[in-house]
Image (tube, helix red, strand yellow):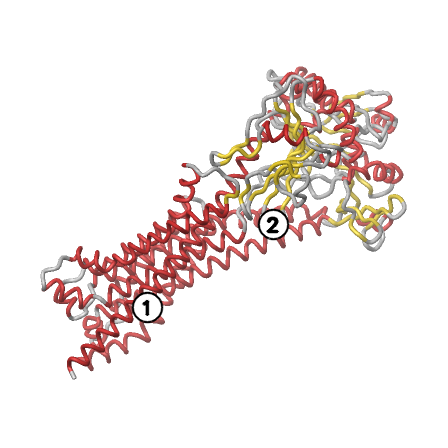
Amino acid sequence: MIPLKLHLCLRTGTAMKRVWSIASLLIIILIGITSFISAKGVFDALAIRQVDSWFSNRPIIFTSQLTDKQKGIFVSELQGLVSEGGFVAIGRNDETLQSGAALYTFSVLPTRPNEGATIDALSILETTVVDGSVIDSVVAGEANCYAGYGNDSFSRVSDLPSIRSGLYFRVDKMNSGEDLGDSCAFFGLDYDDFQTLVDRLSSAVGVSSETLTTKMSGATSEIGLIYFFCAGALVLLSLVLCLLMVARSLLELKTLGVHLMLGWSRVDFASNLLFPQALQLLCLVPIGVIGTLAVFDGFTIGADLAKYAFISMLPAAMAILASMLVAVIPLFFTKPVETIHGRYSRRGFYILTAAVYLVCLIAIFAGCLYIDQPLSMYTNLARVQSTWQQYEGWYVVRDFRLDNARFTGNPMDLSGDLYAWYSEHEHDEGVYLANTKHYEEASIQRYVGDSATLKPFWYLAASPSYLEQIGVDVPADLIEKANQGVRVHLLPNTLSAAETDEMKDLLIASRKPVDSNIVTTFMENPTYEFAPYDSDNELFTWSTDDELPLVSNGFVIAVITAENMVPFESESLVSSGLDNAYIKLDSQAASNLLDADGRAELNGSMNARFATVGNYIDGIQKSLEELFALFSIVLMVLMTAVVVMVMCLIDVANRVNAKEISVKYILGCGLWGLYRREILFVSLTALIGICTSIVLRSRAGVLVGVALLFISLFAIGVVSRKRSTAVVLETISKE
């Protein structure tokens, strides 16, 4: 019987070790895969920034605000200028593919300059993506030829490197304005020549130089949601591996005791126990290599690519090594006699449990630092909502509709129609025009020079009706001049004579009359009028930027009418949203001029659709609520994990201090007497987190920390009440 029992035990032990080894190998493989995918997400974002830097670190013109007609004129004029000068113009258009990957399309003019221009190569991981040879091959090809991403293999002149499911590149010809994209960079052009180029293009297109060189929209490089999921999976899998290895270590304590009595060292035993996992680390190598080769299509195999493969596996290797380190802790902190009897070290077990608890706690307070941003945005929105309450019923341009479908063309094409509509109704009751701009020092120096003495200020372009509504007194003769096409400006009476002269120069330079399809009286005969006014009263800034005030004084005011508009204003009437919109309608004007769906008829089947300020704020609030809810769910999960760890801490205390707790319980000790150490540990760590949050000014950290403190203490009370009696009964039965 004994040999048979021993045989069965050995078989069972061997089978368990085999199952455990297979399970650990599977988990390690999954950790490697999630580590690689997470690293790829980070690298995609870094690569996009690298592309942005390559394109933006040179003279650039922004073309997203141009109409299709203006883009056609732009390309035609640029064609002749490129032939004359020694530079290369490259348009850029960014789009997100259905798979979520980013596609960068670079468009070049069909001809290269006579003198030839040097094009700095775009390189990623020692691999050239775009350079002069690629440009030349596209230029020399047929009309529809291209390089890089695309399905037409017959028109493709060359392939370009790509990051699968992440970043793709394409170089094609700029045959028309449709190929221009959102911006155009110039290679081989110095600053002075660029300014001359901008002036010529501005004159040809009929758009101010400021408009051409001002970025109207931004772009961000974000890590996709799939990568965040993989990062979370990496953490969870690492914890699972850690717990699995710790459990095996605890199960091997009796074996450790026997080996110690036979002369083994703890290091030898731990090395022998963890050697299979050390070998399993080698499976990360093919994962990193195969993954890198599969993802980086067309890249040169070299040191940088090998470095990437290594770095992509580094999080996995660190997670596995950390799990191995934690697993050997019980093996080094238990006494030989206790190991034989399977007794766990009180100190070691406490350290292990407390360490896991602290990791969860740190994760919570770290998460609070991230939730502070949406919380601050939400708070700011509440502030905006309160301040904007007086305007929440006003209407601003939302979008444009063609019949019953949303207009997907360029809104600039509708600027003339909307200008005509506003001209017809600008004197109607409740129709206003208001738009603000905050001029920083850089903007001031751009127009006045580096020696400017002007301080940052607010600029308000407003109709006489709006100025009357907010209590700014404008003399009747100035209003009459504005209606006759004179540019009327009200300057703060606090400006000195020198500042007044600089301000006049800035206002004239920033709003120059240029060629446009919309011709006003002012543009036919530019005339200016400047008058001082009492600027002490605070005015609404119409700004949602939390770094800028909602009200301010010292405004420079332009009294705007349909007759004295410059193209920058007349063509900007199509702008939508809270910050950008020009046209404002109160509720009475909206009921008179808009239909039930908030639409104003422009021409034929085209309509401008308006929405209330309250609708916009509600939309922003909804987005913030969703973001806030997401962060809250994550924090709730972490808080639940901490509470579970508190319960485990009490359970560990009950197991390692069973006799002590039983005696104290029988003697009538209460909660404090039984679990003084645990209560102090939980309370102290939570208070440290709260104090740290106060120092870091994390409101979310303070709120969550206080809540966590009370929840943890409550959990200790509930768990101890249920477990104390069970511990006493179990201890008495053993004795």
Mark 2 or mark 1, which is nearer the start of the sequence? 1
Query: Residue 632, how many percent across, how many down?
Result: 50, 57
Cα separation between marks 1 and 2: 56 Å
Q: Quadrant of residue 212?
A: top right
Residue 19 is marked as 1
Above or below, 454 against 234 in this view is: above
Q: Nearer the viewer, residue 242 or 531?
A: 242
Q: How many C-alpha atoms fall within 10 Å of the one at disc 1: few (<14), some, or many (≥20)?
A: few
Q: For this rendering, which residue is in front, 634 or 440?
A: 634
Q: Position of residue 44 (x, y in %)?
A: 52, 43
Drawn side of residue 74 relative to residue 133, left or right: right
Placement of 252 over or under 377, stated as above or below: below
Please, is residue 658 above or below residue 183 in the view? below
Relative to 505, say whether 98 is above or below.
below
Residue 508, percent from left and from top: 74, 21
- Residue tagged 2: 382
Image quarter where the N terminus lies is bottom left
The answer to whether one can see residue 287 in this image is yes
Label 2: element kind: helix
Q: Amino acid at mark 2?
A: Ala
Q: Which mark is residue 454?
A: none
In which quadrant will I find the C terminus? bottom left
Q: Dot 2 surroundings within 10 Å: few (below 14), some, or many (20 or more)? A: some
**Between 134 and 313, the one nearer to me in the picture:** 134
Question: In front: 101, or 723?
Answer: 101
Picture quarter containing residue 115?
top right
Amino acid type indicated by mark 1: Val
Element on which disc 1 rests? helix
Residue in the picture at 85% in, 51% down:
403
Number of callouts: 2
